Image (cartoon, grey):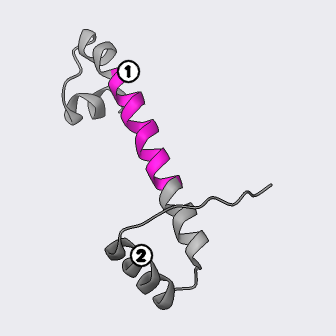
Amino acid sequence: MRESVTISLTTWLKERLDQTVKRGQMNRSDVVREALRDYFARQDLQRIRRNMIPIAETKGIFTDEDVFREVS
């Protein structure tokens, strides 16, 4: 089920949104939905990372190389 939401944008954001729509295959709603999905995915990743850092550090995992060593 879809619901409508009204948002306000600065002139600059609205112009960028309209430029993006003109160049691509997506309408405004598609662009905003994709942007929100990306935003929420980044937020989830940051939350997971914040929660995992203390656990990793107790196991001596501090760098990307340490992670690679553990998963290889």
In this view, 20 is above or below 66: below
Residue lying at 23% horizontally and 28% vertically, measured from the top left: 66
The foreground one among 7 and 25 is 7
- Along the polypeptide, which appears first: circle 2 or circle 1? 2
How packed mark 2 is, by other alpha carbons closer than 10 Å (few <14, some 14-19, many 20 or more), is: few
- In this figure, which residue is indicated by the disc labeled 2? 14
Residue stretch in magenta: 37-52
Q: Quadrant of residue 64?
A: top left
Residue 51 marker? 1
**Which SS type dominates the magenta stretch?**
helix
Residue 22: x %, y % from top left: 49, 90
- Residue type at tag 2: Lys
Look at the numbered disc 1 and give the secondary structure of its residue. Answer: helix
Q: Quadrant of the N terminus?
A: bottom right
The foreground one among 17 and 66 is 17
Residue 17: x %, y % from top left: 44, 77
Residue 25 marker? none
Q: Is residue 35 magenta?
A: no
Look at the numbered disc 2 and give the secondary structure of its residue. Answer: helix
